[in-house]
Image: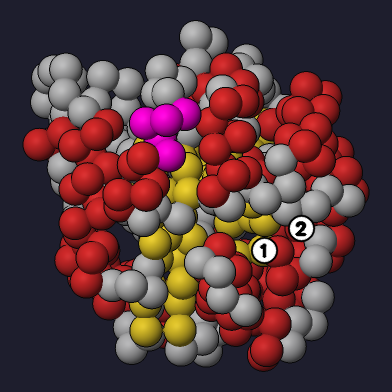
Amino acid sequence: MTTFTYQDFDRQLWERELEDFVPATVYDMHTHMWSEDHRGSLTGAPTGLREEIDYQDHLDWAAKLYPGRTFHMLVLGTPMPGMDAAGHNAWMAAQLAADPESAINMMVTPDMTPEYVAAQVDEYGFLGLKPYRTFAPDPVGARICDFLPESLIEVAHHKKLAITMHLAKPTGPADPDNQRDLARYTREYPNAQWILAHCARSFNSFMMEEAVHFLCDLPNIWYDTSAVNDLYAHYLLMKHEDRKRVMFGSDNVVAGCARGKYITYGRAWLFYPGDEAGTPHCDSRATLVIYEQLRQERQVAEMLQLTPAEIEDHFAGNAQRFLAMMRGGS
């Protein structure tokens, strides 16, 4: 299993490039927790998303990553087909009970009934829903309804819930089906609020180029910036969107604290772990994905001349207002 570490090299990069950029309060709107107690029918040694991490672990990591900052988060259910979803959701609620400024999106699967989801939201006070494409028959080519049935979107509408959506299909937000579905769902279920994860899953900027103007015109759309390491994708989103709809996210710990970078080529992207072989001409050590992301967010802030208030909003204010709205506040 992968071992996640924080090294002197990471601290040096933070001090040189990020200390003066990241404001005093951080709301991370895309994190995951996991306990093997809820592995359900999963077998074998834990790999991938099955990284044991609880609420205190997140606080410990945040203290390393963003030293001296106040930290809260939106925790998303970890999507593992075969998992004990009911136990996982109840465990997350217990973990976050001590932090009322943080929130949880319930892990939902297509076989859950609307009545069950509504009752779970009432019992545990979930902010919203977290569906995922791996629960669809075709995880690559799935439409939204293949892993989030419309009956659950109706629950989100009636109960005024958030939906964190990781879009499927090879072109993500640029796919015509995804665009048609988002346009219809935001129109017909206006009380549901959609957080499009990973800059609307624009890990490669061509997707944002082909989608940003369409997305800007949709109501009830929000974004988290988690794990995107494409500079131009961040730039396009912050240039064209209402910046108050864009919220910081990390995808910590499994993705954000991996050592390496998500790189792009052609119309693709993949995780690159860094390679010291054949690079004697430079310092070839890799830092963490979240620091690569933050470096690009800082560069975009400089390019677009974001004000200190806009930067503070990106890291905290937008999320605070979103959470207050979802909870019935001002």
Q: Position of residue 157 (x, y in %)?
A: 62, 44
CB within 8 Å, label 2 to label 1 = yes
Horizontal arrangement in the rendering, residue 53 relative to residue 252 (left or right): left
The residue closer to the viewer here, 236 or 54, is 54
Position of the N terminus by quadrant: top left
Q: Earlier in the sequence, mark 2 or mark 1?
A: 2
| Residue 113, picture quadrant | top left
Residue 237: mark in rendering = 2
What amino acid is at disc 2? Leu
32 vs 178: above or below:
below
| Residue 67, picture quadrant | bottom left
In this view of the protein, can residue 271 be seen by the observer? Answer: yes
Task: Give the residues in magenta.
Answer: 114-118
Horizontal arrangement in the rendering, residue 203 relative to residue 179 (left or right): left
Q: Could you tell me which residue is drawn at 71 percent across and 40 percent down?
A: 189
Horizontal arrangement in the rendering, residue 22 relative to residue 219 (left or right): left
What is the secondary structure assignment of the residue under circle 1?
Answer: strand
Q: Which residue is mark 1?
A: 246
322 vs 160: above or below:
below
Q: Could you tell me which residue is drawn at 47 percent across and 29 percent down?
A: 114
